[in-house]
Amino acid sequence: MNPLTQIRFLLRITHTHSLVRRYFVVNGFDGALTMLGLIMGFLISEPADLSVIISACLGAAIALGVSGVSSAYVSELAERRRALRKLEDAMVADLQQGAHGEAARWIPMLVALVNGSAPLIICLIIIIPLWLAEAGMVLFIAPLYVSIITAFILIFLLGVFLGRISEISWLRGGLQTLLVALLTILLIFLFAGD
Amino acid sequence: MVLVKRLVLDILKPHQPNSLEFTRTLAEVGNDYHVTLTVIEIDEDTESVEVEIQARNIDFEAVQSAITDMSGSLHSIDVVEIYSEPAKE
């Protein structure tokens, strides 16, 4: 069995397909909104050096990634071990060598990887315009605005993905998450604005 | 040469992998395996199944290993059918 087929098999027998998908969307959304909040904060504050903004965003991205990996691994490992023990009791057998034992070892790692990489990757995509500007590339509008537009696009796409899962219109799904992003901006203006 | 033609096994397995996947994996042990699975009893976490395997020559060790890999537990071998074939010269 090739690794991809094996991962699919382990996800199927543990019913963790939807869990991984949920973690991806929830934490990806977390990452995008955090970046949006940070960049909006810089936008309404005294002008800061681009390198300072990049460092702050990168710091938040790494923290979200590490938090995602560690929290998901610890909780999922406990869940999988508990499920394996329950099944071993029912089977009156040691299942460490079987598929369920393998799932108890690998699924927490996979879930942790998805949970940590989703916000990290989304944050890094949002930071790209800032990096490009710092590297000397001339952007058609200010880099902070390009990052905000990128965040909006990613948030919309996450909504589209959610829409497809829940079998509602992709446009409706996208607009729903976009509305949350707009609400976030409004709250930032209300509480952090001058 | 002794050929194991047919086996009927009593197996306790978790609900996942499901019966279709379980049977398919057992059939993939050999290239001419004919496998029939009958669910005997379903509990909260497990199910007892009767698996009948027919082939030209069943590799029992490989079948047992496939069952263990899928977290199944072989309880008993209920039927065995063996043919004796004269050795080829």
Image (tube, rainbow, N blue to C red):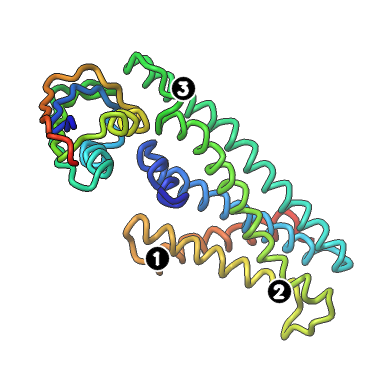
Residue type, numbered disc 1: Arg
Whether residue A143 is situated above or below residue A56 in the rendered picture: below
Percent x, y of residue A113: 59, 46
Residue B37 visible to an observer of this rendering = no
Q: Nearer the viewer, mark 1 or mark 3?
A: 3
Whether residue A165 is situated above or below residue B21 in the rendered picture: below
Q: Do the residues labelled 1 and 3 touch (CB within 8 Å)?
A: no
SS of the residue at dot 2?
helix
Residue type, numbered disc 3: Arg
Residue A41 visible to an observer of this rendering = yes
Percent x, y of residue A66: 69, 44
Q: Which of marks 3 and 2 is in front?
A: 3
Residue B53 falls in image quadrant? top left
Q: Callout 3: few (<14), some (14-19), or many (20+) C-alpha neighbours within 10 Å?
A: few
**Numbered-mark total:** 3
Of callouts 1 and 3, the N-terminal one: 3
- Whether residue A77 sits left or right of residue A137 in the image: it is left
Between residues A127 and B3, which one lies in front from this camera angle?
B3
Q: Callout 1: few (<14), some (14-19), or many (20+) C-alpha neighbours within 10 Å?
A: some
Chain to which mark 1 belongs: A
Read off the residue under disc 2: A145
Percent x, y of residue B56: 15, 40
Read off the residue under disc 1: A172
Read off the residue under disc 3: A82
Residue A32 falls in image quadrant? bottom right
Of callouts 1 and 2, the N-terminal one: 2
Q: Callout 2: few (<14), some (14-19), or many (20+) C-alpha neighbours within 10 Å?
A: some
